[in-house]
Amino acid sequence: MDKTDFYRTLDTAPMVPVFYHADLPTAREVLRACYAGGVRVFEFTNRGEAAAEVFAALVPFAAKELPGLLLGAGSVSDPRSARRFLRLGARFIVGPQYVPAVRRVCRLRGVPYVPGCGTVSEVGRAQRAGCRVCKVFPGEVLGPAFVKALLAPMPWSRIMVTGGVEPARESLEAWFDAGVCSVGMGSKLLPADLLAAADWPALAGRCRACLDIINGLKH
């Protein structure tokens, strides 16, 4: 994959669902619903014993059924896990913190690495190592004011935020007005009650509504 595909796609659809489920049929339907709602970058997190197994099955499913969807692995904190998910077909890697060894693995394979950063120094360190997008995490602790303050002396920074983002205009407006390039959302976007009810049209509608708000804010 040309790495520019990831950044270009993220610019076009700047909301990333952050999701894990041990049940493969459920995970497939969530992917399909998000795709129907306009999602084109999807982070499947390494947060359960079945993560790699489910991810391995989602990769060919997405390639066949969901053209243009970039499926990556999140919650990756060590090089061994990074190598495993890259072998399985991850199109990008996301972590809760910046790990130089994970960055080296991703660089060797030409795959984007989005590390979690909680300070200006961490963002700078990741940028100097070649990370083009940094994830501000945890967003609910740092808040939009942190992003705005960071971008004042470092306006070239491309910031994704995960945590503290709500699928509502007020929350999205606060983050995009602060200057983020994209947002990640987990259970607030994909609530457990809709998953339990298998209400896939409702999930698709939530994704579409959020992307419509974001696109309106960016134009």
Image (tube, rainbow, N blue to C red):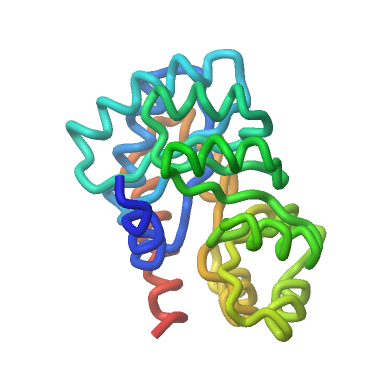
Q: Quadrant of the C terminus?
A: bottom left
Residue occupying image coordinates x 45% and y 17%? 23
In percent of width and height, residue 128 lies at 65, 61
Residue ID at (76%, 67%): 143
Residue 36 seen by the camera: yes
149 or 81, nearer to the observer: 81
Nearest to the observer: residue 174 or residue 72 = 72
User: Which image quarter: residue 159?
Assistant: bottom right
Which residue is depicted at the point 34% across and 45% down?
70
Q: Position of residue 174 (x, y in %)?
A: 64, 76
148 or 91: which is nearer to us?
A: 91
Residue 165 visible in the displayed image:
no
How many numbered marks are there? Answer: 0
60 or 93, nearer to the observer: 93
| Position above or below: 139 against 33 | below
Compared to 46, does 188 lie above or below?
below
Residue at point 70% right, 41% down?
Answer: 99
In the rendered image, which quarter contains the N terminus?
A: top left
The location of residue 75, given as percent across then percent down, is: 62, 35
Q: Position of residue 32 (x, y in %)?
A: 29, 38
Which picture quadrant has residue 104? top right
